[in-house]
C-alpha cells in the first residue's frame, strides 16, 4: 500500500585499473538487476549530468560521457590536449561528482538503483599516484567528504601485466605501466581499511567475474536496510 515503507535504491560503485573490464561488467550487472525488478541507471565518472542520462545511459561509446563543462575540461586533459596543475585537475574530477550528487541522492531516495563506473576512489588514487609532494591521499580525500556514500564498492583487481595483455594500454594520460602499478598499490592501501568493499579477481573469465559480482551485490542488497537513507562519505 502507499503507506508501506519506500524501498530506496542501492548505490553501487565499480572501481579498478584501466582495462579491468569495469564498463562491460557494469552492463552485465545492469541487465541482471533489471531482470530482478530493480529500476537501474548506469553513470560513469568522469561523466555527464544525471538529468541527461535517461536518454543516453544505454549508449556504450565512452567518449560521449564527458560533455558537461567540467567533463569537457577533464576530457581534454586526459587526451593530452590541455595541461592542468595536479591539484586543479583533481578538484575538477571532484567537482564533476559534486555536480550530480544531488541527482544521485534524489534517484536513490525515489527507488532507483545506480551503478557508478569509477568514483571518489579512482579520484584519490590516480591523483596521489602522481607522487606530487603536496598531493597526498589525505589531501585528495578532503573534497570527497559529504558526497553520497556507496552501499557497496566492487573493486575489480587485475595485475598491470594482465591489463597490458588485454589489447595494451590506450593513448590516454595515466595509461602507462609505471602509473598503473602505483594506482594498483594505492587502491590496495585504501581498500584495506575500508568497509563495504568487495575485491573481485578480474583476471578470471567474464562469466566468472560477473557471477562473483552478482553474489557480492545480492549479499549487499539482502543486508541493506532499504528504509534507511543514503549515507555520506566521511
Ligand atoms: N580518473 C577518473 C581520475 O584520475 N580521477 C577521477 O576522479 C576519476 C573518476 O580518469 N584513467 C581517471 C582514471 C582513468 C581516467 O576514466 C578515465 P575511464 O573510466 O578509464 O574512462
Ligand atoms: Mg580508461
Image: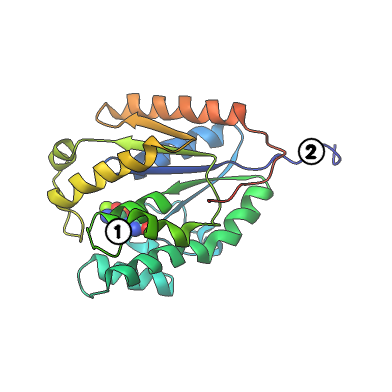
Q: Quadrant of ligand 1?
A: bottom left
Q: Which mark is residue 226?
A: none
Name the residue nearer the viewer: 90 or 78: 90
Name the residue nearer the viewer: 150 or 103: 150
Is the residue indicated by label 1 positioned so its CB lies within 8 Å of ligand 1?
Answer: yes
Task: Give the secondary structure at mark 1.
Answer: helix
Query: Label 1, label 2: how many angstroms apart (C-alpha)?
Result: 41 Å
Q: Position of residue 144 (x, y in %)?
A: 47, 58
Measured along the vertical axis of the image, is residue 191 above or below residue 174?
A: above
Q: Residue at x 35, y 51 (%)?
A: 122
Q: Position of residue 95 (x, y in %)?
A: 45, 67
Q: Does residue 224 appear left or right of residue 131 in this picture?
A: right
Circle nearer the N terminus (1, 2)? 2
Q: Does residue 220 appear left or right of residue 5 in this picture?
A: left
Q: Position of residue 207 (x, y in %)?
A: 34, 26
Q: Which mark is residue 127?
A: 1
Measured along the vertical axis of the image, is residue 29 above or below residue 135?
A: above
Q: Which residue is mark 2?
A: 5
Can the viewer see residue 189 in this picture? yes
Amino acid at each position: 500500500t502507499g503507506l508501506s515503507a519506500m524501498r530506496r535504491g542501492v548505490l553501487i560503485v565499480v572501481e579498478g585499473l584501466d582495462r579491468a573490464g569495469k564498463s562491460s561488467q557494469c552492463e552485465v550487472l545492469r541487465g541482471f538487476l533489471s531482470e530482478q525488478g530493480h529500476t537501474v541507471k548506469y553513470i560513469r565518472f568522469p561523466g555527464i549530468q544525471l538529468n541527461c542520462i535517461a536518454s543516453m545511459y544505454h549508449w556504450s561509446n565512452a567518449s560521449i560521457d564527458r560533455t558537461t563543462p567540467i567533463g569537457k575540461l577533464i576530457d581534454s586533459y586526459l587526451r593530452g590536449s590541455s595541461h592542468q596543475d595536479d591539484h586543479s585537475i583533481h578538484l575538477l574530477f571532484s567537482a564533476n561528482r559534486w555536480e550530480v550528487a544531488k541527482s544521485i541522492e534524489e534517484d536513490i531516495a525515489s527507488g532507483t538503483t545506480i551503478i557508478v563506473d569509477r568514483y571518489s576512489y579512482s579520484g584519490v588514487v590516480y591523483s596521489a599516484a602522481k607522487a606530487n609532494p603536496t598531493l597526498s591521499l589525505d589531501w585528495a580525500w578532503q573534497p570527497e567528504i559529504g558526497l553520497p556514500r556507496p552501499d557497496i564498492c566492487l573493486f575489480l583487481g587485475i595485475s598491470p601485466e594482465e591489463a597490458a595483455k588485454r589489447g595494451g594500454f590506450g593513448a590516454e594520460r595515466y595509461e602507462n605501466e609505471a602509473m598503473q602499478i602505483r594506482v594498483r598499490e594505492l587502491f590496495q592501501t585504501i581498500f584495506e581499511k575500508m568497509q563495504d568493499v568487495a575485491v573481485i579477481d578480474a583476471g578470471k573469465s567474464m562469466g566468472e567475474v560477473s557471477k562473483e559480482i552478482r553474489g557480492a551485490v545480492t549479499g549487499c542488497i539482502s543486508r541493506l536496510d532499504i528504509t534507511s537513507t543514503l549515507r555520506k562519505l566521511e
